[in-house]
Image (cartoon, coloured by chain):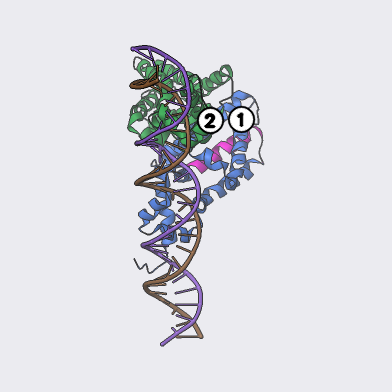
Chain colours: A green, B blue, C purple, D brown
Amino acid sequence: MARPAPETHGEILAAAARRFGVTGYKGTSLQDIAREVGCSKATVLYHFANKEALLGELMAPAIAVLEALDERIAGHTGADLQRVAADGFVDLAVRFRREIALLGGEFPDLLQQPAFAHIQQISERLIDAFAGHSDRPAARIAAFVVLAGIAEACAEFVDFPDEELRPALLAVAHRALEPTT
Amino acid sequence: MARPAPETHGEILAAAARRFGVTGYKGTSLQDIAREVGCSKATVLYHFANKEALLGELMAPAIAVLEALDERIAGHTGADLQRVAADGFVDLAVRFRREIALLGGEFPDLLQQPAFAHIQQISERLIDAFAGHSDRPAARIAAFVVLAGIAEACAEFVDFPDEELRPALLAVAHRALEPTT
DNA sequence: TCAGGGTCTGACCGATCGGTCAGGACGTGG
DNA sequence: CCACGTCCTGACCGATCGGTCAGACCCTGA
């Protein structure tokens, strides 16, 4: 091969994003990624400690924004909280919909891993915000439907332009969420 | 072991449903299922041709009801269609939420298999019905959010009583779906 | 008593998984 | 010229996967 410039790291990252998006995390082998890059599996593991580290580096920007949103909603209450959470989450989901898509619906499994444990808690706080801090089952169920539905829709409509997807998701979110009592 | 009655078939089915629900289809091995039953992996494969046949028998009732819903919505139009589709899907999702949960978010992968290919088409017709036959992007996006969100919520709220889950899902579905123009 | 069919099992198979390791190729500074 | 660090590789590892197979066990009917 004799690559003059060591841009392999980025190429592996891009190839992994593509493969994860098609066949999911568990469904993609290091062999698959190496084949797409055109290098050996050992090279992939030279640039990344292991498969999980690859996923971690791929998700890092999205997670950082998610944590920022988590801090932001902590300063709001009532209907204001609901609006800030919905707007913030839709914006995040649209911006990072490629990252959401590449998980391929494997959120539940991946969130079990200790490295992503705090994301589970953040998503629970988001549900709580969507529900307007209400613990009525109907409010919590509606909040979950909105959160999960938006995430899935972002994975589905990956090729839609941002300026069309974002307002449509915002509209359905505000329609679906109950007004805070 | 010396089992007097050959009820092993049903025991394997029940054990598979439990395991799939916890670790998903791909994440559950025939070994896992055999261990839960207390028999050998070979016994599992004596009662079922292969792993996919096991899943097929587990999902058969839910698929039959889904196909019935698909036929039923074919006879309606307009706002009537939207209401029938939403009510029918919520009812189906609640009744078979255990089956939805045991797929563990692996729908996209599993639907690729030719055995489940027609389910993909049914879900597309459901989206179409939710959107009131509109091809406006916003309507189709809202329809997808509702469909995916309800499915995910059913998997999440597996232990909720039917009579509490069903009306809550119906309410959020009717709120979220745009009125047909 | 014995033949036959249903049930079940341990041993085994090839494939693939994530991951390790010794070492080759190559550019660079002393 | 040589030593060193970076980049990369083929060969290999143990584990696990879904699936096969010959045969053991047991009940039943002739």
Q: CA distance from mark 2 to mark 1?
A: 44 Å
Magenta residues (range): B75-93
B64 vs A25, left or right, is right
User: Where does the image place residue B133, in percent across and percent down from the top left?
Assistant: 65, 31
Q: Residues within 10 Å of mark 1 (few under 14, many from 20)?
A: many
User: Which residue is denoted by mark 1 in the rendering?
Assistant: B131
In the image, what residue type sits under mark 1?
Answer: Ala
Q: Dividing the picture into quarters, in which one does residue B161 lie?
A: top left
Residue C24 horizontal/vertical position (percent): 44, 31
Magenta stretch containing residue B62, yes or no?
A: no
Q: Secondary structure at mark 1?
A: loop
Q: Residue A101 shows which numbered tag?
A: none
Type of secondary structure dominating the magenta stretch: helix
The spot of residue A109 in percent (x, y) is 40, 37
Q: Quadrant of residue B70?
A: top right
Q: Which residue is mark 2?
A: A38
Callout 2, which amino acid? Gly
Is B91 included in the stretch rendered in magenta? Answer: yes
Please name whichever residue, B39 or B157, is drawn nearer the observer in this view of the structure: B39
Identify the residue at horizontal 40%, vertical 68% (top origin): B5
Q: Assign the N terminus of chain B to one quadrant of the image.
A: bottom left
Residue in the image at 39% along x and 59% along y: B40
Residue B169 visible in the displayed image: no
Name the residue nearer the viewer: B75 or C1.
Answer: C1
Judged by depth in the image, the label closer to the viewer, 2 or 1, is 2
Q: Is residue B120 visible?
A: yes
Q: How many labels, in total?
A: 2
**Which of the chains bears the disc numbered 2?**
A
